[in-house]
Structure formats: C-alpha cells, structure tokens
Amino acid sequence: MHRTATVFVSALLLVSPMAHAQPGGMPSDIEWKVAELGAVINPAETAKLYVPLQETEPYQGIKVERDLQYGPDPRHALDVFAPDQENSAPRPVLLYVHGGAFTGGNKRSPGSPFYDNIVLNAARNGFVGVNVTYRLAPQHQWPAGAEDMAAAVRWVSENISARGGDPARVFLMGHSAGAVHAASYVAHGRFHGAKGAALAGAIFLSGLYEFAKAPPGPPEKVYFGDDPAKLAEGSTLGKLPTSPLPLMLVYAELDPPSFIEQAKLLNEALCRAGRCPRLVHLPKHNHMSQVYAINTPDTDLSDEIVAFMKSGK
C-alpha cells in the first residue's frame, strides 16, 4: 500500500467508531494492522497478528492423533482432534483442507499454531476436527487434489466412528487452493464412491471456481497447466449448482479482487439454480486473517461455521 494511503487508513481507523471491535469481532488493535496490509495475500505478516491469541500445546481437554495415513503418499496424512470426554451421541465432523497456491502449505508447521487452530476450535465446540494435507503441484497436477479429497473423505467415513465422530455428518471445508480441491471433489461425481459424496455439507473459504473464461494466474498454471480443456474440466462454477449438498460460501473484504469476484459469481450461479448458499462476507478481514482468527476471541467466521454445521444450512 502507498505510504500516503497507509497513513490515511491508520488515521481513519483511529478516529472512527468502527475501529472498536464488536463483541466477537476483530480486535481494534489488529484491525488497523490488517487494513495497512491491504488486499494482498501475506501469510507471514498476517500470522504475526494472530499468533499471540492462539492456544499452545498441550491442548487441555482435547485428544490429538497426528499423522494418520489416508493414502500411500507421504503427504497423505491427517490429524484428528476430539474432546476427550465421552459423548452420548456421535459428533459432527469438520474436515479441513489448507491452502498454499497448489504448491505449498501443510496441515501443521512445527512451532506454529496454524492450522491446529481450525480443528482445535471444532473440538472446543463439541465436534471432531480432521486436518488433512495433500499432494502438491507441479509433481501432482489436476486432478490430484480432488483424488486426495476423495481418499480423505473415504478414510473419515470408514474410521471416524471409532474416534467419536458421525460419518453421516461430515463437513468438508477448504481455504484458497484447499477450497478449489474441496469444490472439485463436491462438483465431480466421478470422485465419489458408492455412498456418493459422503458429506453433510461443504464450506468454501476464498476459493476460485472458474478457470476457463479468464487467463489463469501462475499458481493455476502450475496445477492445471495451459490446456484449455483441463482448465474447463477443473472449473466448478457450472457444476456446483447441480450438487445437492448444502454449501457455505465465504469471502473476505480484503481478499484480492479475483476471489471476491468469483465468490459472487458462484453465489449468483447457485441462487439461479434455486440453491442459494449460506453466504458470508467477512468485513475487515483479509485472505489469511479469516483462518488465522479461528479459535481466538475474533469469532466472526467460527460462529458461522458452527451455526452451519449445527443447522445443515
């Protein structure tokens, strides 16, 4: 952001009553710092704002299983978080898929609270949380991500009962590139097994859904290549409206413009089909802060996730 604009935004936030966080919203001391970063994807600087608000291990009251294999590749690994107290009924399950521009990212990095925070929050709300990682481009291109989602969902369907989860109430949630993989799995029935999608719903956080009608960016080229047929096949905008699953669609105010545009396009396509999703616009947040804020006092997104999983709509 230009220095003059930065000074203006900072001054505006300091004098505006909107700088005071609403209950459960973004803390005011973080709000102006996120605004200064602007509508860019900056994981390192955004993470610094939320690390001090996150829990550190060991996580009291939570049973954690790490690096369970759901397939043959070393990155076919997942973590399971569940409340350690017994429950009279099986718990809903949140299956989280991280981002990373198709070429990076992990379910957990040593010394970082991310993305434990996602599944920890699920467990704190009485659910079972599953954190999954997947194969990366350029070694593994389309449709590797959708294939990995299918394998992870199948593992959860077959193994989550033993961990207190309900295989009939599994919600798949992906962020950024993870949202692309999650949407690909939901949209393409050929990746589903005999039980269908085996999901109760899906949540897409700041994903991309149409690659054939606009020039793909560098990350999309690495994963899909330049073949127009593959870009069209990997696009889910025209396919998701035919899915019967309840969907929740999220974008952030400070997302880069392409993510906002594509979220609106998908929402319009779903509504035209009579299948309007639960649409969540996150004010003040950027592409990364929305997920880094989960399991902190900033509950704007996590409250929506909990409500969606409890209601199924």
Image: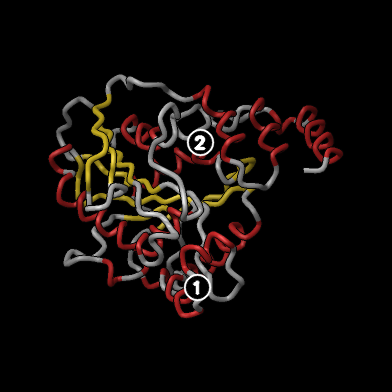
- Rendered position, 175 above or below 117: below
- In this orientation, which residue lies closer to the viewer: 48 or 166? 48
**Sequence-wise first label, 1 or 2:** 1
State the separation of the CA atoms marked 1 and 2: 33 Å
Outermost residue to the front:
139
Q: Residue at x 66, y 32 (%)?
A: 31
Q: Judge from the rendering whether residue 265 lies leftward or rightward of residue 175; answer left or right.
A: right
For the residue carrying disc 1, how many other residues have a C-alpha within 10 Å: few (<14), some (14-19), or many (20+)? few
Q: Residue at x 71, y 33 (%)?
A: 18
Q: Which mark is residue 45?
A: none
Could you tell me the amino acid type at mark 1? Answer: Arg
**Image coordinates for residue 6, horizontal then vertical, percent:** 80, 37
Q: Determine which quarter of the picture holds residue 19.
A: top right
Q: Secondary structure at mark 2?
A: helix
**Image coordinates for residue 184, horizontal then vertical, percent:** 39, 64
Q: Secondary structure at mark 1?
A: helix
Q: Judge from the rendering whether residue 184 lies leftward or rightward of residue 161; answer left or right.
A: right
Could you tell me the amino acid type at mark 2? Answer: Tyr
- Rendered position, 64 above or below 138: above
Q: Residue at x 41, y 69 (%)?
A: 240
Q: Residue at x 58, y 76 (%)?
A: 213
**Image coordinates for residue 92, horizontal then vertical, percent:** 26, 43
- In this orientation, which residue lies closer to the viewer: 1 or 22? 1
Q: Which mark is residue 272?
A: 1
Image mark count:
2
For the residue carrying disc 2, how many other residues have a C-alpha within 10 Å: few (<14), some (14-19), or many (20+)? many
For mark 2, what is the residue? 292
Q: Determine which quarter of the picture holds residue 244.
A: bottom left
Q: Judge from the rendering whether residue 89 lies leftward or rightward of residue 42; answer left or right.
A: left
Q: Nearer the viewer, mark 1 or mark 2?
A: 2
